[in-house]
Amino acid sequence: MPLMRCRAACPPRELLPTHGETAMAEPKPKPPKGETDRVLTEKWGAASMQAGFTAFPDVIFRNMKALGLTHLDVLVLLHLASYWWRPNELPWPSKARIAAGLDVDPSTIRRSIQRMERLGYVQRRYRKAEAGDNKSNIYDLAGLVRAADKLSRQELETRQQREAEDLARQATPKTLELIQGGKST
């Protein structure tokens, strides 16, 4: 197959993946410590940041299938995370509130939470009102935190291995043969 010339600004051939390699996206650069608030405000605007934001690990998005999560499950988790402000104060939004935010029936939220309970990512804790009525459940996400931590550690290890391989590849001098008249010397 003849080589095709790249008319756009293409990377040099030595930077392209070779047979058996895959092109990997570069890891996102991290802002210097203490700049996160400033960077988020620049991206989303001061009003949006003052109204509130939710921190959620990227590894959960990238590994939804491996975790057995559906798109709805992740949206429910995002809603739960948006109510989880401090590590020792677990979230307790009602299923009706989550359902209203996602424009689905509360029974859909109940089924999603039950599925995530079976997977070990969410644990419901019942709350009773003084009058004996049920209050909204408290949701413990410790199982999800453990799963995300395990995946994050694996991802970081893989990233370190790739970086070490890249450095080794860059440090290895390429030996070239001089070919004269069809014979190598």
Image (cartoon, rainbow, N blue to C red):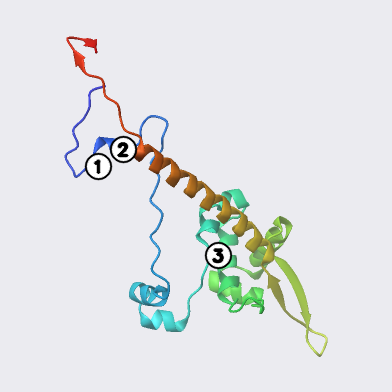
Q: Amino acid at mark 2?
A: Leu
**Nearest the camera: 134 or 36?**
36
102 versus 12 height, above or below = below
Instruction: Give how far across and how far down residue 149 sits, in percent.
Output: 60, 59
Depth check, mark 2 against mark 3: the one in front is 2
Q: Pointer 2: what residue?
A: 16
Q: Which residue is mark 1?
A: 11
Q: State if disc 1 and disc 2 touch (CB < 8 Å).
A: yes
Whole-angstrom CA distance, mark 2 to mark 1, is 7 Å
Q: Earlier in the sequence, mark 1 or mark 3?
A: 1
* Sequence-first disc among 2 and 1: 1
Q: Which mark is residue 75?
A: 3
Crowding near the residue tagged with mark 1, few <14, some 14–19, many ≥20 C-alpha atoms within 10 Å: few
At a point 69% along the width and 72% down the height, the residue shown is 139
- Left or right: residue 54 compared with residue 49: right
Q: Position of residue 69 (x, y in %)?
A: 61, 55
Image quarter in which the N terminus is found: top left
Report the residue at 59% width, 48% height from top.
66
Residue placed at 41% from the left, 79% from the top?
A: 48
Tell me if label 1 and label 3 are in contact, CB under 8 Å.
no
Going 63% across and 75% down the picture, which residue do you hit?
87
Residue placed furthest toward the right: 132
Q: CA distance from mark 2 to mark 3?
A: 36 Å
- In front: 141, or 35? 35
> What is the three-letter code of the residue carrying label 1?
Pro
Query: Residue 21: which disc?
Result: none
